[in-house]
């Protein structure tokens, strides 16, 4: 029995889950429903080495070090980490995975940010679908609906079976209005489209060539020109950017004459909004879901999340309240889908709150803002053991460093300094410098910047162990 290769799609920014989810630290990397991130929950779900091979992961270039770090810290292997030069929706992403795999490999396409509570039912459904997939069908998984959702597409099952427990697809249906969704549930035979697929790699590529040849051509050229970058696979950017953007549903599944559906009940949710997190959360006697330091009085039906300070709510109902160190969201629960409009406004106004939170992660560790004032700002910097920042300089700012914990090796022009706790140094404007942690414990430092411009893009990299020289700094 051949192994199944999970192809995990790690793209997306989860804008409806702002302010917890940010463009540079999106929802799939957050612990939203357990102590693990959504990505690690997904990888764990296919961790049975007797049936599943190491997964192929497809992610945004900006997220590559975060994804790799989470896998490494959890001790989880992967079968290839492919970097999309730019998001082109799911059809091209899956094509990259199919081209990386062997032609007769079974690919199980999963999103990194979905909740599946019933792992046993998931594995049973995959096993059931594998027979049809091995015989050349493109199988999608249809979730048994428990309410007339208007937020999901639907799949109508056809008559008969293409394999035990797997039906042909009669039709795919766009997200319906409420009356239509209620009709679907009353009629029966309609299931939610979960965006989970299983098929042979060669069969997906055959259907892509038949129905969207321009996508296949661009992806094939991109993978033919792919280059290794540390542990990552970089498809040729110029070739991939010529690829049209389309979903696997529109490009292939809705046009394929061998599409099949495996009905299943998995305790599934795509966790697309704060109201859905309320749906799946553990509620108190008043129907509230709370996370972090919260205090509620005479409140009901609320989702309240604090990632920093105490959040108190009195005499409210059906609200979403989310507090992070640098932003707070308050919305009615029935308007949670509209949080995306706030992110769109932040983007249009060029504000950083849609990109980063207070803590900004880097391959060497992280930094977080403590204070911003006129011509100065204060940061806390944490450098992982054995890690190093790039050799760099700044045109507009000077920096003062104080070691709080650990040991720092500092390159400053032609000098090399070794600093320990309570020691510090000064990096003049224009000096070439590098910060390293040669120790075995995290290096914790306070940095005070001063100058006429303090933006992160005032960094010129000369050398970098993470191959970031020439990349824009975000």
Image: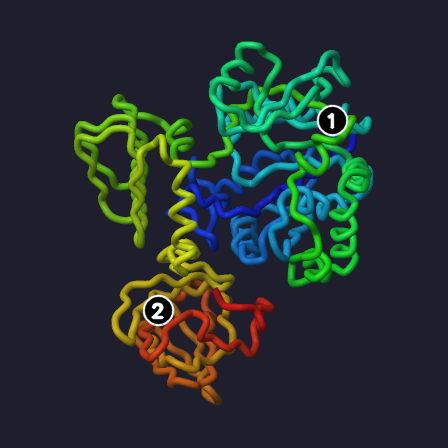
Is the Cβ of the residue at disc 1 closer than 8 Å to that at disc 2? no
Q: Quadrant of residue 397?
A: bottom left
Q: Residues within 10 Å of mark 1 (few under 14, many from 20)?
A: many
Residue name at image x 29 percent, y 76 percent:
375
Q: Is residue 156 left or right of residue 407?
A: right
Mark seen at residue 67: none
Question: Residue 36 or 145: which is nearer the viewer?
Answer: 145
Residue tagged 2: 445
Q: Residue 95 appears at what percent x and percent y?
A: 72, 45
Q: Is residue 251 left or right of residue 461?
A: right
Lower position in the chain sequence, tag 1 or tag 2: 1
Q: Nearer the viewer, mark 1 or mark 2?
A: 1
Residue 107 at least partly seen:
yes
Question: Residue 414 or 58: which is nearer the viewer?
Answer: 58
Quadrant of the drawing holding the N terminus: top right
The local secondary structure at tag 2 comes to strand
Q: Work out whether 407 lies above or below 184.
A: below
Q: Is residue 159 left or right of residue 324?
A: right
Residue tagged 1: 259
Q: Residue 373 appears at what percent x and percent y?
A: 25, 70
Q: Quadrant of residue 418?
A: bottom left
Residue name at image x 72 percent, y 12 percent:
159
The local secondary structure at tag 1 comes to strand
Considering every residue shown, the one lying at the far bottom of the view is 414
Q: Residue 115 appears at what percent x and percent y?
A: 50, 32
Q: Separation of disc 1 and disc 2 at Cα?
A: 56 Å
Q: Work out whether 353 lies above or below 105.
A: below
């Amino acid at each position: 029995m051949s192994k199944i290769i999970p192809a995990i799609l790690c793209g997306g920014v989860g804008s409806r889950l702002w302010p917890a989810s940010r463009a540079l630290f999106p929802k799939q990397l957050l612990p939203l429903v357990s102590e693990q991130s959504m990505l690690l929950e997904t990888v764990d779900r296919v961790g049975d080495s007797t049936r599943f091979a190491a997964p192929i992961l497809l992610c945004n270039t900006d997220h590559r070090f975060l994804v790799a770090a989470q896998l490494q810290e959890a001790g989880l292997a992967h079968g290839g980490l492919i970097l999309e030069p730019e998001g082109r929706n799911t059809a091209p992403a899956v094509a990259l995975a199919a081209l990386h795999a062997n032609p007769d490999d079974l690919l199980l396409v999963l999103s990194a940010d979905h909740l599946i509570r019933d792992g046993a039912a998931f594995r049973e459904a995959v096993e059931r679908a594998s027979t049809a997939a091995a015989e050349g069908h493109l199988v999608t998984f249809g979730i048994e609906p428990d309410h007339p959702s208007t937020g999901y597409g639907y799949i109508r099952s056809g008559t008969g079976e293409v394999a035990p427990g797997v039906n042909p697809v009669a039709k795919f249906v766009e997200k319906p209005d409420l009356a239509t969704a209620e009709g679907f549930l009353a009629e029966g035979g309609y299931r939610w489209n979960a965006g989970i697929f299983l098929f042979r790699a060669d069969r997906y590529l055959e259907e892509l060539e038949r129905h969207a040849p321009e996508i296949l051509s661009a992806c094939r050229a991109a993978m033919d020109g792919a280059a290794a970058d540390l542990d990552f696979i970089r498809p040729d950017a110029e070739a991939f950017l010529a690829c049209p953007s389309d979903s696997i549903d529109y490009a292939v599944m809705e046009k394929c004459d061998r599409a099949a559906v495996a009905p299943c009940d998995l305790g599934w949710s795509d966790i697309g909004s704060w109201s859905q997190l309320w749906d799946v959360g553990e509620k108190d006697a008043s129907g509230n879901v709370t996370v972090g330091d919260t205090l509620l009085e005479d409140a009901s039906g609320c989702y309240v999340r604090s990632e920093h300070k105490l959040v108190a709510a009195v005499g409210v109902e059906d609200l979403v309240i989310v507090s992070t160190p640098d932003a707070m969201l308050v919305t009615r629960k029935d308007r949670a889908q509209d949080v995306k409009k706030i992110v769109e406004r932040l983007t249009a106004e060029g504000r950083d709150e849609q990109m980063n939170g207070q803590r900004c992660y880097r391959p060497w560790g992280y930094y977080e803002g403590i204070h911003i004032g006129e011509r100065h700002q204060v940061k806390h910097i944490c450098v992982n053991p054995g890690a190093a920042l790039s050799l760099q300089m700044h045109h507009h700012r000077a920096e003062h460093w104080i070691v709080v914990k650990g040991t720092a090796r500092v390159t400053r022009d032609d000098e090399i300094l070794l600093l320990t706790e309570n020691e510090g140094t000064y990096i003049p404007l224009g000096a070439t410098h590098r910060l390293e942690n040669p120790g075995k414990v995290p290096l914790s430092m306070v940095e005070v910047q001063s100058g006429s411009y303090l933006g992160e893009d005032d960094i010129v990299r000369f050398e970098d162990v993470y191959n970031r020289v020439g990349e824009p700094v975000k």
